[in-house]
Amino acid sequence: MSNHQTLISIVIPLYNKEQYFERCFISVVNQIYKNIECIIVEDCSADNSLKLAEQLIKKYTGVIKFEIIKHMHNYGASAARNTGINNSRGEYIYFLDSDDEITVNCIHSLVTLIEKYPGIDMVQGNAYQYPQVERDRYDFKGVFPEFTQGNFKIKKYYNKHFPVSVCNKLIKKSFVTQNILYFKPGYIHEDQHWHFFAIKYIETFAFTNEYCYIRYWVPDSVSTSLDFSHSITAYLMIAEDILSNLDIDFLENNLFRAHKFLKRANTKILSDTKYLHFLPKYKLLISKLPNGMLFLRLAILWELKYFKKTLFDIIKLPWKYARTVR
């Protein structure tokens, strides 16, 4: 049984989530582990999110410490998480999205593992999506061992399987600050960028099969937006940073990851002519891959479904553009 001595800092970026935030807040209040500080970073919402958060905290009479930090401008989730990191006092940080919730045993289950493996860099909880789906990409039950040690061993296995979301992890604060693992402001898909660099430094990792996190599918969230401009910008940025920070021991894996993000960017660029201005940046990054376009073409041919979609989209686009991708 946990002795409840480890202070945990839960960081919640809050922006225009008035409709969902109370559910998130209550899930923190209901934790059976109580040595928690909860830092809510209000990112200049246009709705009543701030007012709601203030009302909920005012009504709360328990022992969990809540604090609201207000941004004067809307800087985005990355900047909000960085603010949370810089203002946290806990030994471990836990990121929680304001439209999701955690189970009552969440922090207790994760703290049990940091007490079992003292000084561990990171502990990951299991999760599931709601509404539930047949193949849940957040559910890793039975996939990972409880404990893994050694950077090479972790990179070899978790480069392909590691849960990308920064949420639902107890992350040692000193691991973040000493390795300068802050989030890159101004971009979405910041979790995927952070994940690549975190894997470079992590030495110890633990996983619990217990469900700790409930991820809700929210149709109006940034990541589900129908405007692809922010996604394309982020995918190109991630690919560029990977190619600029290649790990010689895992070169093939790193190149595959860079290709994956370039492929995602390519799919969205081809979806509409309004995204053609991203083409020069895309072509520049493609040229940095081994054998340039040949590398990408072989990967596209290997994924027949994707190849068909690409052909279909090229036919729809102006001939001038089609010539540039032949």
Image: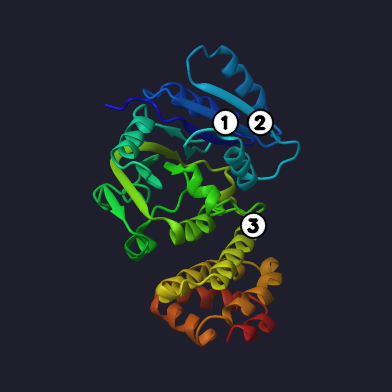
Location of residue 83 with respect to 142 vertically, above or below:
above
Q: For the residue labelled by badge 1, is the local secondary structure a helix, a strand or a loop? A: strand
Left or right, 39 with reference to 185: left
Local packing at callout 2 (Cα closer than 10 Å; few below 14, some 14-19, many 20+) is some
Which residue, given by chain and number where applicable, does mark 3 sit on? 230
SS class of the residue under badge 2?
Answer: strand
**Residue at x 53%, y 51% (from the top left corner):** 178
Residue at the extreme right: 72
Disc 3/disc 1 C-alpha distance (Å)? 27 Å
**Earlier-in-chain disc, 1 versus 2:** 1
Q: Is residue 180 visible?
A: yes
Mark 1 vs 2: CB contact within 8 A? yes
Q: Let me know if residue 98 appears in the view.
A: no
- Report the quarter where the C terminus lies: bottom right
Q: Looking at numbered disc 2 in the image, what kind of residue is underneath it?
A: Ile
* Image coordinates for residue 93, horizontal then vertical, percent: 48, 39
Q: Which residue is mark 1?
A: 39
**Of marks 3 and 1, which one's residue comes earlier in the chain?**
1
Q: Nearer the viewer, residue 220 or 174?
A: 174
Nearer the observer: mark 3 or 1; the answer is: 1
Using the image as rendered, state which of residue 166 and residue 179 is in the foreground: 179
Residue nearest the observer in this picture, 7 or 262: 7
Crowdedness of circle 1 by 10 Å Cα count: few (<14), some, many (20+)? many
Residue that label 2 marks? 69
Mark 3–mark 2 Cα distance, whole angstroms, equals 26 Å
Q: Earlier in the sequence, mark 3 or mark 2?
A: 2
Q: Quadrant of residue 101?
A: top left
